[in-house]
Image (tube, rainbow, N blue to C red):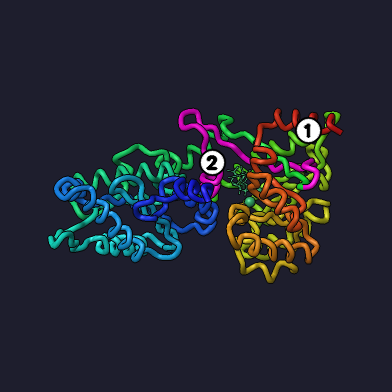
Amino acid sequence: MLQDQIRYMDSYDILTDLANRNLMEEDFTNNLPNFIKNANPVALLYIDIDDFAFINESKGYHAGDHLLRDMANRMKNIIKKDDLISRLTQDEFVIVLTGEETLEDIDIRINEISKGTKMEWEFEEEKYMISTTIGVAIYPKDGMDFINLLKSGHLALECAKENSRSSFEYFSKERKCSIVKDLSGVSDVKLALETGQFEMYYQPIHDLKTHRFENAESLIRWKHPEKGYISPAYFIPIAERAGIIDEIGEFTLEQVFKQKSQLNKLEHGLKKISINISAISFSKGSFADTIKEKLKKYGLKGEEIVLELTESSFSTHGNMIKKNIEELRELGIEIFMDDFGTGYSSLARLKDLQMDYIKLDRAFIVALLDENGQEIIKPLISLANALGKNVVSEGIETQEQCSILNKLGSEYGQGYFLSKPMPYEELEKLIKEQSEKG
Ligand code: C2E
Ligand code: CA
Ligand code: CA
């Protein structure tokens, strides 16, 4: 009971019963993989009640609380099922629109919300005209994570308040020299490649029973000299759109093959290395040949390489991918289907597809401890097992998740609980430690 109470207070605003900032940030972050996958614009609305201080001061806190609750109820009625909503502080609310397909649709929704939060409000037989001002930030253009998007939304709100009340305004790049502006300049990525700002990290893929590992997934890291760490979840899609993903792919393959051959020279190596491949590269006719050349160059066998391809690319990039997969599997290379479970359409076709393992998307693991979480995951794992595929669960952060997943039939797993992604040197050390343990 006390535990429940504490958890509630950690995540909710008691006055309005809306999510608080913590929960909103968590929900937003958990949804990021879907935002990226769907490639639709997501809008964060930073909403402020006009003249709230006036009500609070002239009518007392009791009136202020009343207004906040009424406003919260109004907002709950205008939002759609997939939208996120929270009260941040005092009279500041945030709504995130996640289900719109275009910027025009977003604009229509914002107009509705702006109108819907205008109301004639009655308190102790007096009437007040209440309205809101809204600052809008669009993901990923105005911020690539919750914190940055919120910042942009807040700046937009400040601008909106300066210009006029009871309206809304979009975040404007001109007001702030944002990272996005430079990033969309493809030259930045090219420069990063030339000046060695990219590096490969490795995250072990563990056996969930023994916790040992024989494979590790390579994950690219961009350490920008001024902007710090930039997530691949952000720049890979940009590189894909800009037509320079092959250059990044070439860097990844070179680096990983080289480091795998380096590992092979040590007393204790690693059976396999797993590499993420963009569907754009994978659907090129020359892709299998590129891999063959690299195997030869670094003296590796096909059995030492695993290639990860997202579930959606299996279905959207058709025949060339199929042909490449067949050719690569003949060499002994294994194919992992990444982010499984996010595109239901392909479930039925699963048995026709050529893949060796499937990776259960992190979004499912997060939901595991929810009421119905296990009921959703169980059939996914059973289906995979029935088709003779092993399941790797992604994003395992607790012991509890680890043992439940193992019980449900997932043999392998990755996640911060088991090992975080690490630089090559640390991977070497970890492999050594593991073999010394015996
Ligand atoms: P992914 O293939 O689904 O990779 C798993 C992501 O989950 C990684 O994010 C990893 O760091 C993160 N992760 C691992 N364990 C946990 C955990 O316990 N909790 C949480 N919250 N996250 C965890 P990362 O490294 O940011 O990579 C994001 C995506 O970028 C990858 O998703 C992959 O699609 C893409 N990517 C990464 N490296 C490459 C690359 O070399 N080439 C290509 N084409 N794509 C890459
Ligand atoms: Ca992956
Ligand atoms: Ca994944």
* Residue nearer the viewer, 328 or 314: 314
Q: On screen, 386 above or below 410? A: below
From the viewer's perspective, tell me whether residue 367 is left or right of residue 108.
right
Q: Residue at x 50, y 48 (%)?
A: 7
Residue at mark 2: C-beta within 8 A of ligand 1: yes
Q: For label 2, count other residues whose C-alpha is less than 10 Å away and answer few (under 14), some (14-19) or many (20+).
A: some
Q: Residue at x 48, y 37 (%)?
A: 188
Residue type indicated by callout 1: Ile
- State which region is magenta: 209-238
- Classify mark 1: helix, strand or loop: helix
Task: Give the residue at the far front of this rendering.
Answer: 1
Residue type indicated by callout 2: Ser
Question: What residue sits right under mark 1 in the picture?
Answer: 431
Measured from the top left, where is residue 157 in percent x and y?
27, 47
Question: What residue sits right under mark 2 in the picture?
Answer: 231
Q: Does the rendering let one see residue 261?
A: yes
Q: Residue at x 30, y 50 (%)?
A: 135
Spatial CA distance of label 1 from label 2 is 26 Å
Chain-order first, disc 1 or disc 2: 2
Residue 358: which quarter of the image?
bottom right
Q: For label 1, count other residues whose C-alpha is less than 10 Å away and answer few (under 14), some (14-19) or many (20+).
A: some
